[in-house]
Image: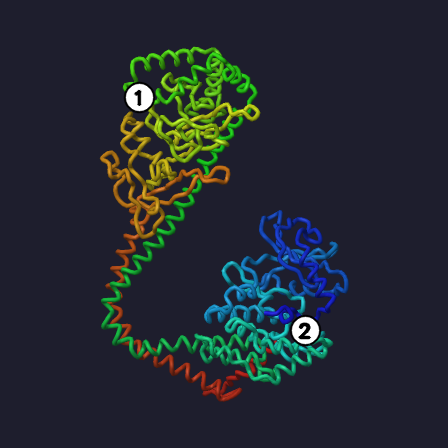
Amino acid sequence: MTASTERTEGQSPDERRQAIELSLRRARPPGQAPGFEPQEFLGAGAYGEVWVAIDRNTGRRVAIKFYSHQGGLDWSLLTREVEKLRFLFADRYVVQLIAVGWDADPPYYVMEYVERGSLAKRLGEVGRMPVDEATRVFKDVAIGLVHAHGKGVLHCDLKPANVLLDQDGRPRLADFGQARLSHEQTPSLGTLFYMAPEQADLQAAPDARWDVYALGALLYTMLVGEPPHRSPRTVTVLEQPSGLAHRLERYRELLRNAPPPDAHRKTPGVDRALAEILERCLEVDPDKRYPNVQAVLDALRARDARRSRQPLILLGALGPVLLMAVMAFFAWRGFEAAYKVADQELTKKALDSKQYYARFVANSAAYELERRFELVEDTAAESEFRQRLAPLIDDETLRPIMTRLSDPAFAVPDRQLSPELRAEQSALQEALLENQARLYLEDYFQQKLSNDRGIKVASWFFTDARGLQIVRVPSNRVNIGSNFGWRTYFHGGPLEQPSTWRPGPNDHVQETQLSAVFQSTSSNLWVVGISTPIYRGDEFLGVLALTVEVGQFADLRGSGQNREFAVMMDGRPSNPGVIVQHELFTKLLEQKRGEFLRRFRDYRVPIEQIGDTEDRYQDPFAKDLLGADYRGDWLAAKAPVRVRDEETGLFVIVQERYDEAIGQALSPLKRAAITRSLLGVAAMVIIVTGLWAYVMRSWNQMASIEELRDEGPSRPTEDGLTLDFRARDETRTERSD
């Protein structure tokens, strides 16, 4: 579509140039609208700019049209457009006026924001629309025009750009800048190829048939992809330099001399009745056109009535034979299909609810993790921590001890160590444990653990630059003096390394991060570490970290009587699909059977199965004797745990028994369907017997009414009354005009 044929007539070259300049000023709106916060530039025209804004009072999105092009602006334009919108207040087929800034500089008015943009944008995306959708939009626009005409407002510039689509795809009329009241005699120019030929006259008086022509051009554009009569040749002819009056004359001659457009008849799905309605709307002679938009609606309804009768006739003729033959078969298949659809719909709704709950729990877990991220970072920045750490790092007596303890020779189980090495290791660890600088820092961590801002923490520890754990609270004599540089909380990689692996100079975490989960040797619960690097200037000193049991940073308890509860799963390469927190864990701990938790570490979740409406979720713990209560079908939805806009690799899974979520709702449906099927079989015999007689009687009555309509404007009836169809149309014309 060329720009010259899409604009409303009436802009001079200077105005078009200024419109282009306005369209480039997108950084900020040309003025202020009190109570509204500009968000996004939508577009510009000869008279100003349109912006999306937020109503500060209600939070809803609106569109603000600023009349910012003051040079050559007809200042009555704003008044005229607002006047027309005032007449159409609360009409759902019209974009509604919200507020007007009469005294602002520049003036503006606020209208509701329609989410899906214009019909022109939709056509730009799809080229042309399916016939059913185009007909629906055509009908809704016609209804909107009837409402406007009923209020005495003629649009006079109907085109795809002036039809906006709401979130349901329903059209709304917009841009009443060229509109006229029915009693006004002021001419109004529309847009080329959407404008009726008689409208393209500077002396023409507004007429309801202008909108009829534009309505037909709109339907033609939706079906074909471009407006009637437009082609490269016609565009070239109309683009030739000339005065406005001469150009309008050429447009009128073009439409009067051109053959009627027929591309719509080649569009699949366009029936003859629809084609005839469109062609009558596009009649060049206004006397042959529909007299008003109500007449177009009447023709559409007549078409719909005829189309609805066609299957009725077929049903009356063939239904009795076919229905009785296949009734039993299709009744059963229909029940199966209905049951499946109901199952899928209920499952989808249930999964939507689970998804919402999963996101809620995931957000709660993310919030708790973020609190611990901040706790580690705040601790690392505390001056007291730094002051207590410095003597430990600078203690010359400890350096050879820590260097020796980091030797991979000690990174084997105690039973594999030689007596000499075991004795040496024990002596070195004892010297480390008794070091006063280390005890000084341990005392700080002990205070930290007892005063943790209400944040549950399993342990605090510091690991030096070699990966050697120097301080840990609660104190653990086995861990202190052991090298853990192979752990993910130290080297920052996705997988843990062999225990004999030692980090290089840059093999350490670069920022605060979440470690891989691992099982605690004391509680058998899954634990995760949050670590951050410690620097002194450019010197890397080591890693400060805390650990927390996975079940401590998210509430995974059931939400009620429906056996709905949440679990947490690790989806990272270190433990893909392993459930790290589950309702069963809590039960075993309450029963003091925590030693059994280790047996579940190898049960994996089939992550791709979660959220599938076809396949039911199977709790992996149901395979174990201790997890017998979790056997059967479940509905499950998952949500990732994100911290600082990055996925942690942890997932929250919300699951609920299928029978409790869906089955109880489907059982009454099954019983009701069987009962109604039996009643339907009995009633069908009676209905089919009278079906043909009813169809024939209805057909004869409709045919009689159509004969009365076709015979002329009036025809006497048996009781002496007169049926006057033409008078009804003329009355509607007078009311619209």
Task: Using the image as rendered, state which of residue 458 and residue 320 is in the foreground.
Answer: 458
Residue 334 placed where, x, y %? Answer: 28, 63
Task: Using the image as rendered, state which of residue 638 and residue 531 is in the foreground.
Answer: 531
Horizontal arrangement in the rendering, residue 601 relative to residue 104 (left or right): left
Residue at the (34%, 39%) spot, across then down: 577
Type of amino acid at the residue the image marks with label 1 = Pro
Residue 403 placed where, x, y %? Answer: 43, 18
Q: Nearer the viewer, mark 1 or mark 2?
A: 1
Q: Quarter of the image for the C terminus: give it.
A: bottom right
Q: How far apart are labels 1 and 2 at the CA level?
A: 92 Å
Question: Where is 569 relative to 316, above or below?
Answer: above
Residue 523 placed where, x, y %? Answer: 33, 25
Question: According to the image, what is the colour scheme of the structure?
Answer: rainbow
Residue at the (46%, 36%) spot, across then down: 366
Question: Residue 21: which disc?
Answer: none
Q: Which class describes the residues within 10 Å of circle 2: few (<14), some (14-19), or many (20+)?
A: many
Horizontal arrangement in the rendering, residue 10 relative to residue 467 (left or right): right
Image label count: 2
Residue 82 placed where, x, y %? Answer: 68, 62
Q: Which class describes the residues within 10 Å of circle 1: few (<14), some (14-19), or many (20+)?
A: few
Q: Is residue 268 visible?
A: yes
Q: Is residue 154 visible?
A: no
Task: Using the image as rendered, state which of residue 32 and residue 394 is in the foreground.
Answer: 394
Question: Residue 189: which disc?
Answer: 2
Type of amino acid at the residue the image marks with label 2 = Leu
Q: Which residue is mark 1?
A: 413
